[in-house]
Image (cartoon, helix red, strand yellow):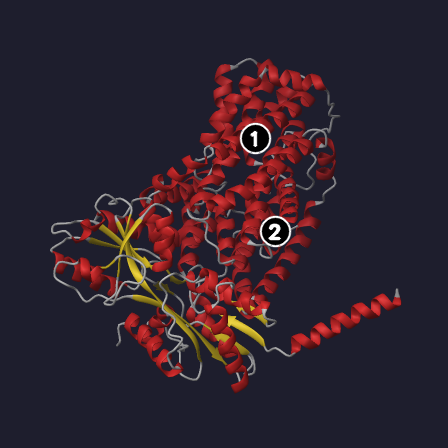
Amino acid sequence: MRKLLMFATGILLSANILAADFPEIKIVNLSSSTGSHFAASKALGRDLEKQGYRVELISPGNACQAGAIIARLPRDTVVISNPSPYSQAEIVKGNQKCNAVLPKPNNMAFMLSVNYTMCTLSQKQNPNAVFQPGASFRVGHLKPTHIWKNAVDQLNTANNTNNKRIQYNGAGPTKAALLAQEIDYSILAMPHALALQKNGATCIAEFTNEQPTVLAASVNSLSSNKTQLEAAESMSFIILNANNSQLAQLRTDITKIMLSRDTESGKIKTPGAVFFENYSFERRADIALSHIKRTAGVD
Amino acid sequence: MEFVLAVLLGIAGGVLSGIIPGVGATIVVVLLMPVLLAFDPVYILVSFVSLYSISQYIGSVPAIILGVPGEISSMAAVTESKEIIKQHRQSEAIAHAALGSLFGGIICLAFVVIGLDILNYLAIVFKTPIKLTVLVLLIAVTAIVADNRGLINVYLMILGAFFGVIGIHGTYNREFLTFDNPNLMTGLPLFPVLLCLFVLPTFYKIVSDNKNFQAGEIVNITINFSQVKSFFKDIGSAVRGTVLGFFGGFCPGITCAFSSQLAYVAEKIKHKKSEHCVKRVTAAETANNAGALSALLPMIVLGIPISSSEAVVLTILQMKNFTLNFSNFQDMLLTTTQALVITNIVGVLLAWPFGRQLLKLLTNIHPKRLYSVLFTVLIMFCVYVGYINYQAEFYIIVILALLPVGWLLRKLETLPLILSFMLVNMTIDSVVTVVELYS
């Protein structure tokens, strides 16, 4: 019995010593606690745990509150965070008075972006009807207002249409509205478009000036007078309070996790996502920051 | 394992909710909140449906034997209890109520599982204007049935809405009274608000209304097969109770209570004589179990709460970063169906063969002592929840600020305030969307 106890104690001690080799990491989600950014943070946390890291996910649901928590953590606590464009835009714009958590070359770890799309359920017989002159459909979208007001206004002017904008509080309500046929079209990022397709919707076009990544067409190519609309949702992970070796190690591990097909993070990543893995960290931070500024309307 | 724990917790909560007068599903969900927060979202739902189902079974026992309404949906049984006791038919009534509840629960469950595709149409039915109507009805009906004088309910709702809109919320980021304090940006935290403004007044009322819980004589409940035979002989009452109860359960704010009353009134019209008192109780008790299931559907399928306890569960799920919606309801429904099958079986056993033991348990409780200990423990749990959310000081400040308010409201039923607090932002968002849709 004593030997058994000593063996068990030995196992426990060695497990603790092994665990102590890895930094304890706090993943602080800066976005809302229900969207895709939260899901990605949760998946990354679980994947890092499988690699032996000790991880705690903190998600207060508000960027200022999350920022305050980061500021209160001890300086040697390694933090992974996700400054999504929308979460930081309100702070950068000055609407919420607190400190922004921004991507920088010395903290950037990983970045991806997915295009916004247009889908329909009620107009499946003629999905491009929204671009036809005289069209008057309800187009649902999420925040921020200025980006989508501008997009729908431009489409209306270019195509001589009279489509009406309906703003919802997040992707979930927008999807529900499309499925309830309360709106005729939805503008949502690619992961939501794919979920809608599973529920019978038809997704017609991406908001991109380049070659569409998944769908057959771009919104600009379907518009009569060619528009120059581009909209992508980017997601980036930054590392704070890490020393150089921890930073290098985590950058490698996070990139491996995100690009793998076998990890939880890899499984939830969307077809059509652009990963920027060959870009320098400076360039990635620039792109991520420009997305935040564009969302804030201050670029 | 977590599934079993969740079901057991739900059963324990359901017994508490069903047997103790004044303690409904809403207050039990708040009591269980610290434990529920440790579960995965799906098991929070499993616990809740188990609790909801069991409380409908148990509520009939004190109602029939003691004339004490354990659950609001047992009022019909309370009304008939005098006649049942006069005719010495308590055992028969208990058996019929339990078997009727099982019949109603299982038939409706089978109907939902077989007709799963029909539920997809709920998503089409519940457009924003309908959702808004349901929310307004839920708040209005709760205020109407609340045990306060007319205008007081309006003041309570205004106060609840005032607390609810603090923070940054909604489609257009409405900001109210945040004072640039990050803690206030997500609004007042749910747990301290529930504890101070709902649990405290409710406990106070229970303790002052019940020096002890014993109201009548606990008779022996006999169990024999002839009761099963006589139940099937009068199966019509259970069938009518099932159909009316299922549809009645969709009524916002009063769900199972409405189901039960609807079936009771219909049965009373059909069977007026006093000798049919057991048939009327069977219909009413069957209906509240059928209604318990239908009341859950809008929440599980679309995340729309139609009762106060559902609103609390939904807010707990949001705290766990989980949204119930159209795309994940089928997985949810499958797990909750398994839980409901188990709880229906456990429920019939608890409400019938073990009914007497449950009543003994009730009469041994000393309300003042029980609730004082419970409230102290809950305050400690609340601070702990704040601590793990990196907001311990903020939670303590909110508790200290709201406890005096709760004490001032101690003689009132504060459910309208709480419901208004939890649903005000969802309601404002729905109004904004309806205006955009139809302007």
Callout 1 touching callout 2 (CB < 8 Å): no
Q: Which quadrant would residue B393 be assigned to in this image? A: bottom right
Report which residue position mark 2 lands on: B32
Asked whether B61 or B244 is in front, the reply is B244
Q: CA distance from mark 1 to mark 2?
A: 26 Å
Report which residue position mark 1 lands on: B106
Residue at image point 55% right, 22% down: B238
Q: Residue A75: which disc?
A: none
Asked whether B299 or B288 is in front, the reply is B299
Outermost residue toward the bottom in this view: A244
Q: Earlier in the sequence, mark 1 or mark 2?
A: 2
Q: Amino acid at mark 2?
A: Leu
Residue at image point 21% right, 46% down: A126
Q: Nearer the viewer, mark 1 or mark 2?
A: 1
Task: Give the class, few, some or many, for how many residues have Cα within 10 Å of label 2's Cα (few <14, many ≥20).
Answer: some
Place of residue B422 in the rendered image (x, y in percent of width and height, measured from the top left): 45, 52
Q: Secondary structure at mark 1?
A: helix
Asked whether B338 or B204 is in front, the reply is B338
Tally of numbered tags: 2
Q: Can you see residue B410?
A: no
Q: Which quadrant would residue B64 be assigned to in this image? A: top right
Place of residue B93 in the rendered image (x, y in percent of width and height, measured from the top left): 64, 22
A151 left or right of B239 in image: left
Task: Give the class, few, some or many, for how many residues have Cα within 10 Å of label 1's Cα (few <14, many ≥20).
Answer: many
Subunit that carries the residue with mark 2? B
